[in-house]
Amino acid sequence: MRRHLNTLYVTTDGAYLLQDGETVAVRIARETKLRVPLHNLEGIVTFGWDIGASPQLMAACADRGVTLSFCDPHGRLLATSHRYAPGNVLLRRAQYRAADDPNASLTVARSCIAAKIANSRLILQRAQRDHAPAGSPRAESLAQAAAHLAHRIEATLAAPDLDALRGIEGDAADSYFQQFNHLLTHPEPSFRFTQRSRRPPLDPPNTLLSFLYSLLAHDVRSACEAVGLDAAVGFLHRDRPGRPGLALDLMEELRPVLADRLVLTLFNRQQLKPTDFITEPTGAVRLRDDARKQVLVAWQERKNDELIHPFLDEKVTLGLVPHLQARLLTRHLRGDLDAYPAFLWR
């Protein structure tokens, strides 16, 4: 069983990362601020325009299978440094054949999207139970949305092709995000959620959603590459230069569990304040540096939460779930499993 290792996040502009023996050292103004053993890491992620890394560190990370990702301050991936990973050639040939087969692609994509909708529905049901008094307009709205998502799950499993599946997924996402403001109990008016906005995010909830989705994409992409899959070749997300289609496929089912739930926790427990966000002249909203560090700590803690994996029936941490799902997909592609068992949250 793979161990859940840590991810090092660097958010200070002007930082420079280099190899120091068997550690990665973080220097600012030529002063070493932190050393972390490389064998304790599965990834390094930087956020900023002025953060660099030495070629020696990149080589050391590649040699040890540590993915090094460079992101802008908003969390958008700019570049990734990782080792050459040819994987199992037979596995990749099976992946490419499945991606070229409309029926095989549809089978995997259906599982991913059905699980995403089911996990989103569970969030609505929990909010209805915990924060919406019986008979209240909020409870009624959440119940109607949950019922609609149940129908969308049925439609997903019967989708005749990928285009129809994308339409069903889009409708389910709209229904889910229309209820997102009902899930937020923080009294701050600026934390109100009206609609999903991405590039750029236009309010604090959208800013946090986009940031956590970027972190999740990094983890899922690393998981795909670690098991020998080609992260660029997806089934629902078709080939596009620079896009990790398979990672985007597999992260769909994990968005509600790992990212959305953490967004709600941080706001509803009032761990974030209006002053933790900056509105730029363009209207884009971003996290302040201190708040971003707080979110990264919460993300790492969330990944340490334990649960029973619904298919494997084993106790695992949430941080291991992307790796387990990637391995389950390899078993399906090799013919060991009749279908890909997407992650269903309990």
Image (tube, rainbow, N blue to C red):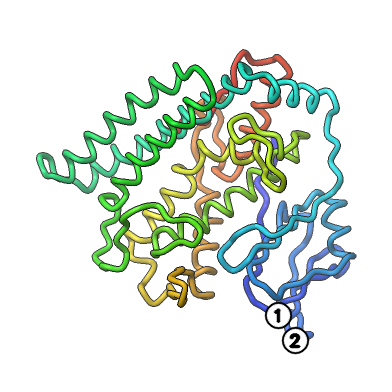
First reached walking from the N terminus: tag 2 or tag 1: 1
User: x and y percent of residue 214 in the render?
Assistant: 57, 54
Q: Depth-wise, is mark 2 or mark 1 nearer the camera?
A: 1
Whether pointer 2 and pointer 1 mark residues with C-beta atoms closer than 8 Å, the reply is: yes
Task: Specify the quadrant that holds the N terminus.
Answer: top right
300 w.r.t. 280: above or below: above
- Numbered disc 1: secondary structure: loop
Give the residue displayed 44% in from the left and 75% down from the top.
278
Task: Specify the quadrant that holds the C terminus.
Answer: top left
- Identity, as a three-letter code, of the amino acid under mark 2: Ala
Residue 29 shows which numbered tag? 2
Instruction: Measure the alpha-carbon separation of dots 2 and 1.
Output: 7 Å
Give the residue displayed 49% in from the left and 43% down from the top.
255
User: x and y percent of residue 165 in the render?
Assistant: 48, 27
- Numbered disc 2: secondary structure: loop
Give the residue displayed 54% in from the left and 28% down from the top.
342
- Identity, as a three-letter code, of the amino acid under mark 1: Gly
152 w.r.t. 252: above or below: above
Give the residue displayed 73% in from the left and 82% down from the top.
28
Considering depth in this image, is 267 or 153 the residue closer to the camera?
A: 153
Which residue is under mark 1? 14
User: x and y percent of residue 237 in the render?
Assistant: 60, 36
Q: Is residue 101 left or right of residue 250?
A: right
Residue 126 shows which numbered tag? none
